[in-house]
Amino acid sequence: MNIKMDGKSALDYFSTFSRASLGMLGVWPEPTRKNENLSKFLFIITFTFTFLSAVLPQAIRLIQIWGNLDLISQILSTAELPFTVALIKMIVLLYNKEKMSNLLLSFINNWNKTINCQHLNIMLKAGKSGRKISFLCIFMGLLTVHARIPQILFLNFDIWRRNDVDANFTLYIEAYFPYDWNYSPVFEITCFIQYVGTFLATVAYTGTDGFFSQIAYHLSGQYHILRLRLLDLVNKTENIKSWIEFDNQLNGIIQNHEHINRCIQILESTFNFMFVVQLLACSLQFCVQGYVLILYTTRESTKSVLFDVSFIVTYLIYQIGNFYIYCYLAEMLQSESLKFAQSAYNCQWYKLPPKKVKFLLFIMQRGRKPVAITAGKFCVLNLALFGRILRTSLGYLSVLITMNKRT
């Protein structure tokens, strides 16, 4: 499939889902930097609404029920941890908006360059993969938000049916509000406000994931193209008219290599704080969600067990899948960085004069320290880290179960 796109069209198409999500929140890094005032207004409104409707009420409720392990677990697992991470993501993206704009400009410039059909197909494949991952992240997030609705409807159905004024409604998320909400229609309005706050937090959480996925896949495709250019240059020296032309082309490859590395450094410097917060939150959240799942399946009252289990399983899949995607993409970038250095060794370097071979030695030496996406500069994101986080969460889970048995 050979489709020629200009850079702006490619960006608009492949980043459709993440751009719509982050644009709604005012944190999409528009390369042209238009409508900055509107973006700031949207950020202030969405951030304030999410904080006041979801994060702050849950934090107050958490203090009120401190000591009740079951309620604490439910509050932390359903909203407080992921919503706090979502707000941090919004702040980080807003603070680094200019750097992210430069990354998108690089994306556009890569597409605007004259490239052959093989390189175009690589970029198309990378763009489509990033688009699919973006859609998957956002879809799973919104599915989790709406999986809560049947659970709440079922829990409150009898109260609506009997019109029992003395019964206690169950909110969309457990929280404290400084007014009496336990009667219609105030209860329904409060639930709707919580739903909107949850929706916005989820959009921030998943839109950031989709944005990272799109950039990571694009940079991975650029590494692949660079590797092919190096192999073609060295293996087909008979097509080179002079060694000056060879030097110029090799110089262009090295400069592009450094440019890609700089882009990854920008990506890493923007996301590394976000990742360390998410890593800590996920370590605790996987464990707490597992504990809540055990509560739902073992408690005596099984009235809504089907809806409860469906919701928490969907939530677990969403959270684990999101963190897996981050680790997978980070390892993919590291692997592509290593493959580029390896290609310098795999090419037919023995055809070159000794002076030219020295340039390839520099490329191989540079590849001994591949690029890496880290969590707060403390640890490198990869699939091995993902496995360690799951094992750690299971260890925490066993502690919670033991504490629950003793109480």
Image (cartoon, rainbow, N blue to C red):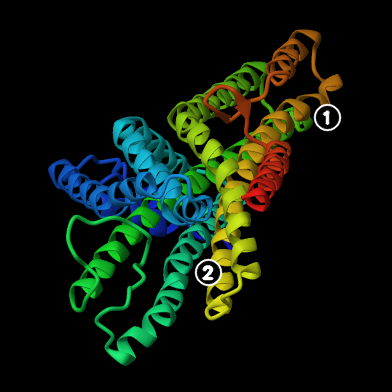
Q: Is residue 53 visible?
A: yes
Label total for image: 2
**Mark 2, secondary structure of its residue:** helix
Q: Residue at x 56, y 37 (%)?
A: 279
Q: Is residue 208 visible?
A: no
Q: Residue at x 52, y 47 (%)?
A: 213
Residue extending farthest to the front is 407
In this rendering, the answer to whether 129 lies above or below 271 is below
Q: Residue at x 76, y 33 (%)?
A: 236
- Mark 1, Cα crowd under 10 Å, few <14 / some 14-19 / many 20+, is few
Left or right for 265, reference 240: left
Earlier along the polypeptide chain: callout 2 or callout 1? 2
Judge by depth and name the residue closer to the eye, 373 or 358: 373
Q: Name which residue type carries label 1.
A: Asn
Q: Residue 1 falls in which quadrant of the image?
A: bottom right
Residue 346 at x, y = what percent? 83, 29
Residue 378 at x, y = what percent? 59, 22
Q: Name which residue type carries label 2.
A: Phe
Q: Residue at x 42, y 54 (%)?
A: 79
- Mark 2, Cα crowd under 10 Å, few <14 / some 14-19 / many 20+, is many
The residue tagged 2 is: 311
In this rendering, the answer to whether 71 lies above or below 90 is below
The residue tagged 1 is: 346
Q: Residue 176 falls in which quadrant of the image?
A: bottom left
Residue 277 at x, y = what percent? 48, 35
* Cα–Cα span, label 2 and label 1: 50 Å
**Mark 1, secondary structure of its residue:** helix
